[in-house]
Image: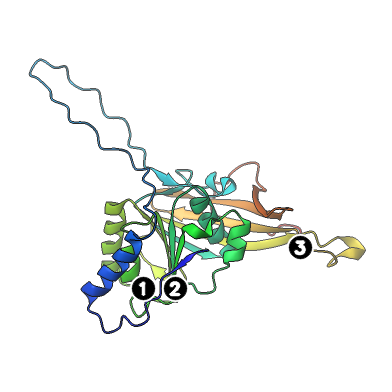
Amino acid sequence: MPVSVDLEGLEGLSRTERIEFLRRRIRSSPARVADAPAPAAPVTLTATAPAPDPAPARVRPVLPVPEALSALLPEGGLARGTVVSVSGAGSLLLGILASVTGSGRHAAVIGLPRLGLLAASEMGAHLQRVALVPDPGPDPVEVAAVLLDGIDLVVLGLGGMSVPPSRARAVVARARNKGATLIVTDGRWDGAELRLDARIRGYGGLGSGARTGHGRVRAVHLGVEVQGRAVRPRTGRLTLTSTGDGVEWGSADSTVSHQDPVLEALPS
């Protein structure tokens, strides 16, 4: 079961005391799986040492996503130390949560009391690695900033609010410093490195012809759009298919489109 963090009763505490309370709760949970590169050993160069080779291009560690989605992302996953905006169909967010926790990492979900945890579990999420803060109080951004220190993935529901650019930059800097990834949804956040949007484009399993509309929904087709800084817009079509044991992700595209986003409806 996920770990629920209740902030009720903390209104009388100072900001410092609230932060310390959250940090204690994080310390009491299993430690974050560290997959950031280890610091390089110190190297001493003498006067006669040859010039070092040019440093290779830096490859950032990423958090896993559903395999069908990874083909649309420039780094094949969500880069650690970044902020990602996710909008539209909630299945995309649940799939990411399932991939991250299913790989042994930990996640926190803030301000999303109606998140479909059963659906996430059917996609492979390990709910015991999820900390829930359904009611973060008047400042959910502060709660998210604290949880970035100790959690691989923090999902922040903004409840329709718009975060000032100066505040957003401070949280981005903290995510980068801690090597954690922040997903923001249901609000405005300027400065996100990636923006993912998913829309339902059709269903499978409802029959055709005279039987159109009969049967069970066995698949959901999503149109996914990816945009970001220094990233050409990409679109793709993903399919969630119900199996006997859960829900599987698949791609309906044989190639990835790099043109301006055009999301076409898929046949049901």
Q: Is residue 227 above or below residue 190?
A: above
Q: Residue at x 67, y 48 (%)?
A: 252
Q: From the viewer's perspective, tell me whether residue 71 is left or right of residue 61.
A: right
Q: Which of 250 and 28 lies nearest the eye of the viewer?
A: 28
Is 199 positioned to the left or the right of 135 in the image?
right
Cα distance in 3D space between marks 2 and 3: 30 Å
Q: Is residue 196 visible?
A: no
Q: Which mark is residue 27?
A: none
Query: Which one is in front in this view, the residue at disc 2 or the one at disc 3?
Result: 2
In the drawing, does residue 162 fall left or right of residue 116?
left
Local crowd size for mark 1, using a 10 Å CA cut-off: few (<14), some (14–19), many (≥20): some
Quadrant of the image for the C terminus? Answer: bottom right
Whether 7 is drawn above or below 220: the answer is below
Q: Residue at x 25, y 26 (%)?
A: 54
Q: Is residue 158 above or below residue 251?
A: below
Q: Amino acid at mark 2?
A: Gly
Q: Which residue is mark 1?
A: 140
Question: Residue 88 is drawn in which quadrant?
Answer: bottom right
Which amino acid, mark 3? Answer: Val
Q: Secondary structure at mark 3?
A: loop
Image spot of residue 224 (x, y percent):
57, 56
In front of the other: 214 or 188? 214
Determine contact: label 2, label 1, CB under 8 Å. Answer: yes
Q: Front-most of 220 and 194?
A: 220
**Mark number, residue 111:** 2
Question: Which residue in the structure is indicated by mark 3?
Answer: 217
